[in-house]
Image (spheres, helix red, strand yellow):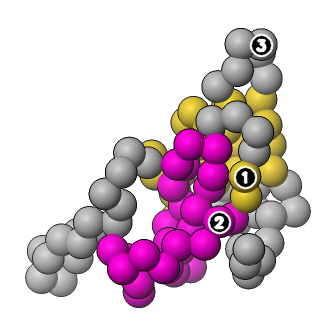
Amino acid sequence: MISLSDNSEVLLRSWECFPAGWSPDGSLLYDACGNNMPSIPASHAGRGAAHTAFTIPEDIDGASISADGKLFVFSAEETKSDVWVVDNFDPAYRK
């Protein structure tokens, strides 16, 4: 994450994850990590404060969150064709 005010940089994750997008208010970043979709509070970036938003049986391969923050669209790595949609998503849920 790069600050626009002072160009400082913060590493969000040290392992391979793929960004899925920001929450509508910019307070959370969602990233696909294996079969988990963690949410990272922007105020705690780089300090291990992620929460699992949801988990699916297979690895997530490419994901996006809707502009209103209530819908994820992603594909799962499986041998058969499948698309998963998470609706009625509650960003306040903590596991």
Residue drawn where x is 48% and y is 79% of the image: 49
Residue nearest the viewer, comparing 15 with 28: 15
Residue nearest the viewer, comparing 21 with 43: 43
Asked whether the beta carbons under mark 2 and mark 1 sit within 8 Å of each other, the answer is yes
Determine the secondary structure under disc 1.
strand
Tell whether position 25 is magenta.
yes
Q: Which residue is mark 2?
A: 52
Asked whether the beta carbons under mark 1 and mark 3 sit within 8 Å of each other, the answer is no
- The 10 Å Cα crowd at callout 1, few under 14, some 14 to 19, many 20 or more, is some
- The 10 Å Cα crowd at callout 3, few under 14, some 14 to 19, many 20 or more, is few
Left or right: where does residue 30 sit relative to residue 35? left
> Label 2, label 3: how many angstroms apart (C-alpha)?
26 Å
Identify the image quadrant of residue 77.
top right
Percent of width and height locating residue 13:
35, 61
Left or right: where does residue 60 sit relative to residue 44? right
Residue drawn where x is 70% and y is 34% of the image: 58
Identify the image quadrant of residue 75.
top right
The tally of labels here is: 3
In the rendered image, the vertical position of residue 80 relative to residue 16, given as above or below: above
Determine the secondary structure under disc 3.
loop
Q: Which residue is mark 3?
A: 80
> Label 1, label 3: how many angstroms apart (C-alpha)?
19 Å
Percent of width and height locating residue 24:
60, 72
Q: Which residues are magenta?
A: 24-53
Percent of width and height locating residue 69:
68, 65
Q: Which residue is mark 1?
A: 55
